[in-house]
Image: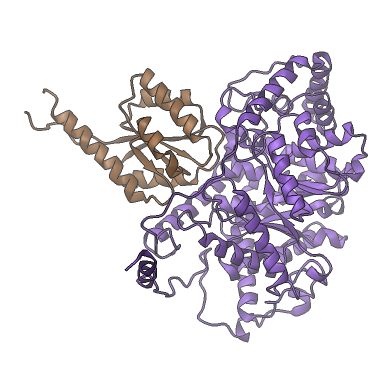
């Protein structure tokens, strides 16, 4: 197996919000933290449609997609997003969600392929650990590819 | 050892109590003690005055809560209009005389419940209210001349209620209630220039105030809406500075339209917040009243005392509440409410303890009402006006908050508030403040129990409010059916008139009421106003206008 001769892959993280939700101060702050930690953040902002968000994911070739919700409608939006991600061939991108996520929904979210759930009480380090873990896995995956 | 014995032991490990911060929550340095030397410059008559006297630092009314008890409020809104009505009926039975109604985020942004992109949000976090028939269902049995309904909603609330009143044959002069026409705060608080350009926002706000002042003198208007901008990320001085800048933008425009300050200001009320820093919030309310009074008198030459005496509507801070061990929020809300009452607010809406979890359960809502009743009847907090007036610390802090607000307002006015919003300066201010808060939390320079200290390791999932969405689905279908069955010719005609009035730069409120009475929806009315101002019909650019405007 060849050693990884490529330079460090800089992890790319697409962040945004769906629907009418205006509670974006959390994700704006998160975007800044992640940038300060050397992660490349594509911040799509608020008020995206599911279609627009997944289109951006395809175009930006991101390693992680992160959505934040302060509205009770998150489960339906996440389901729509997960389905469209599958359809567009980006279903394997690491999917994290944050905000007002209720513990009763964790099981459903995992079943939809959401691997990072950062509800109330989560810290920025929890998010960072998740993103770094994704980065490590991606790097491992790359290094095991034939040269 | 049984499980009952274990609990106190683990609690004992957590008994540490120490001072974690000497700055206020808003970041102002505080001394270890205050003396008469800190307030030596204060001239009682000039700077404080008796309660009910200029500059109203000590309160809006001479007798304060002895003559006018604050209005105890609770917020309602979820699902279809019928669902919200049931909640209101419960509250009126519990003894409330006035209620606050919040609409769902889709209606908040003046879009219809049948918009193809937002189905998961219809009826969530507020009542869905896309047309006059829904407003009629919601307000059935409520006397609009007697029950004080406060709409936590922008400029669409008034024409919609007015349309109900017109259909009931009422004179608009009798209408009682209030709404919050401040749209600039929405642009700041997450809508952004894309959904709500600042210039369009200010025009719609001013149209709303102008029409209401002329037609419904008993209707009050919450402007500035300082609550959302604080929650978005401003300090108490920031609330005063940005709130005042928003008020000035509206007043200047309305004076330009030929109104006087004494036409406008008496109908306005400041929508404010009480966060957890007890003394800082009390100082904020006092500084706010003084700064408002002086601005109205000195800057605008107000003569009517009602113009100078600002009324304050307060809601406790939702952002300050913590998800973990949510019952702690009852303590937080009680302290915030106490600050609001010592600060002399005219109405108070307590957050429910489960606000961080979702919309309130009935139990949580009842406890929020009880908090107010305990404050009113047991604590003596309302016994005398401005009970902390004359405290060296509170007077010094009032001066400090006011001075910081004046300095900030001067900076904003150098740019101009509309430009500052358009170019993102205000957003940058809130971003910086939020980032600083997170940094402080991270370093434990700011300690919030259950968030960054004394965090319970395990807890059962909190109960969340759930309701049957069947009514919501039926309600959306009603709207779809209505759009098919209504008098299309009449709707098109009213929409065309609305477009023309607005296009010519005139106040479109009468035309909005007429269109709503004719069964145009709020999305159609707002979309038409947008098109008349050169914007897209649908702020999200999904729908095209179904109307021909010329």
In the rendered image of this protein, does residue A93 appear above or below residue B325? above
Q: Quadrant of residue A136?
A: top left
Tell me if B247 is positioned left or right of B10 in this view: right
Residue in the foreground of this view, choosing between B454 and B525:
B454
In the rendered image of this protein, does residue B216 appear above or below residue B493? below
Residue B301 at x, y percent in the picture: 83, 59
Question: How many marks do you count on the picture?
Answer: 0
Residue B6 at x, y percent in the picture: 35, 67
Query: In the picture, which quadrant includes the N terminus of chain B?
Result: bottom left
Chain B shade: purple
Residue sitting at 69 percent across and 35 percent down?
B200
Residue sitting at 63 percent across and 58 percent down?
B367
Residue B41 at x, y percent in the picture: 67, 80
Chain A shade: brown
Tell which residue pokes out farthest to the left in this image: A1
Tell me if B38 is positioned left or right of B522 in this view: left
Residue sitting at 59 percent across and 48 percent down?
B361
Tell which residue pokes out farthest to the bottom in this image: B36
Q: Is residue B449 visible?
A: yes
Residue sitting at 64 percent across and 71 percent down?
B398
Residue in the foreground of this view, choosing between A89 and B134:
B134
Query: In the picture, which quadrant includes the C terminus of chain B?
Result: top right
Give the colour scheme of this rendering.
by chain
Residue in the foreground of this view, choosing between B167 and A106:
A106
Tell me if B406 is positioned left or right of B221 in this view: left
Tell me if B519 is positioned left or right of A110 in this view: right
In the rendered image of this protein, does residue A137 appear above or below residue A49? below
Residue B345 at x, y percent in the picture: 72, 63
Q: Is residue B151 visible?
A: no
């Amino acid at each position: 197996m060849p050693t990884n001769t490529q330079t460090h892959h800089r992890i790319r993280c697409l962040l945004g919000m769906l629907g009418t939700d205006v509670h974006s101060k959390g994700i704006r702050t998160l975007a800044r933290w992640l940038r300060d930690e050397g992660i490349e953040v594509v911040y799509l902002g608020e008020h995206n449609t599911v279609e627009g968000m997944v289109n951006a994911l395809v175009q930006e070739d991101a390693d992680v997609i992160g959505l934040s919700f302060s509205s009770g409608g998150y489960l339906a939006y996440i389901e729509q997003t997960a389905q469209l991600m599958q359809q567009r061939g980006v279903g394997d991108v690491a999917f994290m969600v944050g905000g007002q996520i209720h513990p009763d929904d964790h099981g459903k979210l995992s079943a939809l392929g959401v691997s990072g759930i950062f509800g109330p009480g989560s810290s920025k380090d929890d998010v960072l650990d998740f993103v770094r873990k994704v980065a490590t896995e991606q790097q491992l995956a790359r290094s095991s590819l034939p040269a | 050892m049984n499980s009952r014995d274990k609990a106190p032991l683990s609690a004992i490990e957590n008994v540490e109590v120490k001072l974690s911060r000497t700055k206020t929550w808003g970041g102002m340095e505080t001394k270890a003690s205050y003396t008469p030397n800190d307030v030596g410059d204060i001239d009682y008559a000039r700077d404080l005055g008796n309660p009910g006297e200029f500059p109203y630092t000590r309160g809006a009314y001479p007798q304060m809560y002895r003559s006018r008890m604050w209005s105890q409020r609770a917020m309602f809104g979820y699902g279809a209009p019928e669902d919200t009505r049931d909640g209101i009926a419960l509250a009126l039975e519990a003894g409330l005389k006035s209620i606050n109604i919040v609409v769902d985020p889709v209606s908040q942004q003046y879009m219809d419940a049948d918009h193809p992109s937002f189905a998961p949000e219809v009826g969530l976090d507020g009542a869905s209210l896309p047309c006059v028939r829904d407003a009629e269902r919601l307000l059935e049995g409520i006397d609009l001349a007697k029950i004080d309904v406060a709409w936590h909603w922008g400029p669409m609330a008034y024409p919609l209620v007015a349309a109900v009143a017109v259909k009931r044959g009422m004179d608009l002069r009798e209408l009682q209630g209030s709404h919050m026409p401040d749209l600039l705060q929405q642009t700041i608080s997450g809508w952004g220039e894309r959904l709500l350009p600042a210039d369009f926002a200010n025009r719609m706000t001013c149209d709303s105030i102008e029409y209401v002042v002329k037609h419904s003198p008993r209707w009050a208007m919450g402007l500035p809406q300082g609550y959302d901008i604080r929650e978005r990320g401003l300090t108490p001085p920031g609330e005063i500075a940005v709130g005042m800048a928003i008020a000035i933008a509206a007043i200047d425009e309305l004076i330009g339209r030929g109104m006087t300050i004494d036409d406008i200001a008496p109908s306005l009320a400041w929508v404010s917040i009480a966060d957890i820093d007890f003394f800082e919030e009390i100082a904020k309310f006092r500084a706010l009243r003084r700064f408002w009074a002086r601005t109205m008198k000195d800057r605008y030459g107000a003569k009517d005392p009602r113009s100078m005496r600002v009324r304050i509507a307060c809601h406790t801070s939702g952002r300050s509440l913590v998800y973990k061990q949510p019952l702690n929020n009852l303590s937080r809300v009680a302290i915030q409410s106490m600050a609001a009452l010592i600060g002399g607010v005219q109405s108070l809406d307590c957050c429910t303890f489960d606000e961080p979890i979702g919309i309130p359960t009935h139990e949580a809502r009842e406890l929020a009402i009880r908090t107010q009743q305990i404050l009113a009847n047991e604590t003596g907090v309302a016994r005398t006006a401005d009970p902390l007036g004359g405290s060296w610390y509170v007077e010094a802090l009032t001066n400090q908050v006011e001075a910081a607000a004046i300095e900030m307002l001067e900076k904003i006015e150098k740019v101009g508030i509309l430009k500052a919003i358009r170019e993102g300066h205000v957003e940058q201010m809130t971003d910086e403040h939020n980032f600083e808060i997170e940094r402080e939390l991270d370093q434990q320079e700011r300690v919030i129990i259950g968030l960054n200290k004394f965090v319970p390791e395990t807890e059962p999932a909190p109960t969340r409010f759930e309701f049957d969405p069947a009514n919501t689905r039926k309600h959306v279908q009603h709207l779809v059916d209505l759009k098919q069955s209504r008098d299309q010719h009449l709707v098109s005609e009213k929409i065309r008139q609305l477009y023309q009035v607005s296009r010519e730069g005139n106040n479109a409120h009468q035309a909005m009421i007429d269109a709503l009475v004719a069964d145009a929806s709020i999305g159609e009315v707002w979309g038409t106003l947008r098109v008349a101002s050169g914007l897209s019909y649908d702020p999200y650019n999904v729908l095209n206008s179904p109307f021909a405007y010329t």
